[in-house]
Amino acid sequence: MEELVSLCKRRGFIFQGSEIYGGLQGFYDYGPLGVELKNNIKAAWWRSNVYERDDMEGLDASIIMHRQVLRHSGHEATFSDPMVDNKKNNKRYRLDHLVKDQKADVIARVAGAVGQSVENFPAMIAALNADPAKASEALRAAGVRDPFSGEVGEWTEPKPFNMMFKTTIGPVADDESYGYLRPETAQGIFTNFKNVVDSTSRRLPFGIAQIGKAFRNEITPRNFIFRVRELEQMEIEFFCVPGTDEEWHQHWLDKRLKWWEDQGVPRHKIEILDVPKEDLAHYSKRTYDLMYDYPTLGHEEIEGIANRSDYDLGSHTKNQSELGLVARVEENADSIAKLTIPHPDTNKPVVPFVIEPSAGVDRALLAVLSEAFTKETLENGNERIVLKLRPHLAPIKVAVIPLARNKEEITDVAKKIKAELQGLGLGRVLYEDSGNIGKAYRRHDEVGTPFCVTVDFDTVGKGEDATLADTVTVRDRDTLAQERVKISDLGAWIQAKLR
Ligand code: ATP
């Protein structure tokens, strides 16, 4: 992981946010190559989940939302994590992260103090939350250390901490004029359900897809871009007839696993966690968490696929009592819309069930990079770092390299090739004249460029072999094979390989 983080900075994938002022924890900026990789991941997701299906629509809702949305979604009341403070240095930690970071014997003592076993970590955290006074005593008695100072801490009782960012709207900062930065993109889909149905004439089943930023004031952002405060999500809300939800849940589980494989994240590196009943979110009937085996971190959630029942539309709709809702929802006297759709068989209004595959773009990028990062020892004994990204994800598809930077006859041809390849819409094609050829190859290996095209004296008919006129050398990132290709065939040749 450390090597990957260092490569990300060195080659311009990811930088610390606000770095020149000392950085802001939990915020990252995507650099010249990071933005390309991120866009390619999002495009692959959109292509697979919107364009290649006929039962999906897209959406881009606003980030700042009316506080009533986040009230009726349940986020004001429940979108919180328990935290504890160390009175010795005023550092604040998420309770589960604090306990997880302790040595095994300390964790065992914490578990013992609340009558739980170390095997069932969520149950231990739930027990700590259930009795705050006992919890702070348990942390003290177990000798829980402060991860920052390394010393045994003096711990407060756990308190819920709401993770939503609140912001003033308009010129007056009073008790009424505020909204929230959305903590998930999903709510923008639910609040637009009626707009999408009315404008597209969709019938059940169908889904709405959205990619966008979400914000969570995580108590302990950490592990590079794995846990950040400004994140991006790729979310689908798939609306279906109640009773068909379990089938659709399985459908989306299969589809999503296949998609990860297509991005180079193999099936055997993902564990499917069928989330135990007692750990389910308040809206969920059943949830599968896809746990990817991140280097150093181990199995952590990369995507959640939840059956949200009729909870969300049921929570945001008016006339709740007439709709025969299955989920338990809070009363809503604020909504002005009835969020129903005709049942395809009876035509009677129904609140559909929702299946939600929700993946993090940042966590996807970290997984894709982890899988692609490869160190090889070459035949001459040298080490080579290479990002074996799937070509459709590579930030730069082709680097066109003139062998001599100051020979116009060569640079002119190279520039022309760059322009022609760029015109094919493959993604970014780079004219690369920044160093010698060896350095250029090393750089493009490290950033995952699948093909380097070199224009040399032979290309322009001034080399030793006249038969090589109007041809270029194409070097393959993975095999290192070099092939001579006619300029007139180059576009089609590369297109075929990138497909
Ligand atoms: P975790 O348990 O790791 O905090 P979560 O269960 O809160 O995650 P969800 O609410 O299910 O996550 O969000 C859906 C997806 O959004 C996650 O699978 C993950 O990919 C991404 N995600 C959530 N929180 C963060 C974060 N703080 N930083 C980066 N990605 C995140």
Image (cartoon, rainbow, N blue to C red):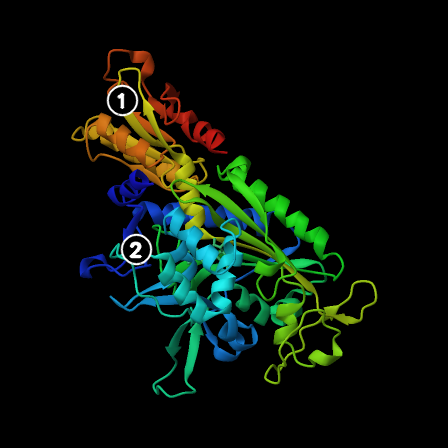
1 or 2: tag closer to the N-terminus? 2
**Depth check: 174 or 169 in front?**
174
Residue ID for mark 1: 460
Query: In this orientation, does residue 229 appear?
Result: no
Gap between marks 1 and 2, in whole Å?
A: 63 Å
**Depth check: 119 or 262 in front?**
119
Residue name at image x 54 percent, y 35 percent: 268
The percent position of residue 364, horizontal first and vertical second, equals: 45, 47
Residue name at image x 53 percent, y 52 percent: 120
The percent position of residue 397, horizontal first and vertical second, equals: 38, 36
Q: Is residue 368 above or below residue 173?
A: above
> Residue reaching furthest left?
406
Q: Is residue 390 above or below residue 195?
A: above
- Label 1 crowd bin: few (<14), some (14–19), many (20+), radius 10 Å: some
Residue ID for mark 2: 147
Q: Is 281 on the left or on the right of 111, as rendered?
A: right
